Image: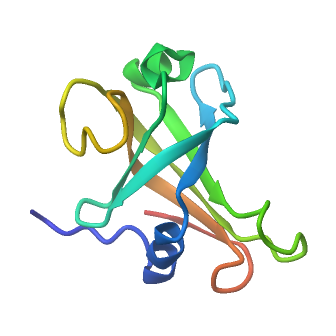
């Protein structure tokens, strides 16, 4: 398998300590999903996979099935000093998967795999930073 290091080591270390994130934006309607979502980072392919209960029946999942883009946010705003927020926003192209495609069944029967095109991080190695990948 071809290794694709999309995330920095600092970002990977941070993501490894977090268990949930938010599917912040789903095009084309921009609907927000505030419920926490489990996720898995595949450093080998440079992708992130998210999944959650009843994801397959949600409008967000159907939007992604139509070839949408997403913004997925992982932050610890609720667990750290409010003056020192830390987090990562992963924007990119996404595909909605069902059945038993890898990495299922680790998260749920319905997952969204995101291939990042832009990563925004704040409070990890200093001030807010953004880069295209």
Q: By what rule are the colours in the image chosen?
A: rainbow
- As drawn, is 64 to the left or to the right of 96? right
Q: Residue visible at 39% across and 25% down? A: 67
Q: Position of residue 42 (x, y in %)?
A: 30, 60
* Identity of the residue furthest to the bottom in this view: 125
Residue closer to the observer: 50 or 2: 50
- As drawn, is 101 to the left or to the right of 90? left
Q: Position of residue 113 (x, y in %)?
A: 36, 41
Up-down relation of residue 133 to residue 95 (above or below): below
Q: Position of residue 127 (x, y in %)?
A: 74, 80
Up-down relation of residue 83 to residue 117 (above or below): below
Q: Residue visible at 32% across and 61% down? A: 46
Q: Position of residue 110 (x, y in %)?
A: 36, 27
Up-down relation of residue 5 to residue 51 (above or below): below
How many marks the image carries: the answer is: 0
- As drawn, is 39 to the left or to the right of 35? left
- As drawn, is 7 to the left or to the right of 122? left
Q: Residue visible at 50% across and 67% down? A: 15
**Image quadrant occupied by the N terminus:** bottom left
* Identity of the residue furthest to the left in this view: 1
Up-down relation of residue 74 to residue 7 (above or below): above
Q: Residue visible at 19% across and 42% down? A: 102
* Identity of the residue furthest to the right in this view: 83
**Image quadrant occupied by the C terminus:** bottom left
Which of the 4 quarters of the picture holds residue 80?
Answer: bottom right
């Amino acid at each position: 398998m071809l290794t694709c290091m999309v995330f920095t080591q600092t970002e990977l270390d941070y993501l490894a300590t977090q268990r949930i994130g938010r599917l912040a934006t789903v095009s084309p309607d921009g609907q927000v999903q505030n419920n926490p979502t489990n996720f898995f980072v595949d450093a080998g392919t440079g992708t992130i996979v998210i999944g959650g209960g009843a994801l397959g029946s949600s409008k967000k999942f159907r939007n992604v099935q139509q070839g949408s883009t997403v913004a997925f946010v992982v932050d610890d705003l609720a667990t750290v000093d409010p003056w020192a927020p830390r987090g990562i926003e992963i924007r990119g192209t996404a595909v909605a998967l069902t059945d038993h495609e890898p990495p299922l069944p680790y998260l749920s029967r319905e997952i969204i795999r995101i291939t990042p095109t832009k990563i925004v991080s704040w409070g990890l190695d200093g001030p807010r930073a953004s880069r295209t990948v």
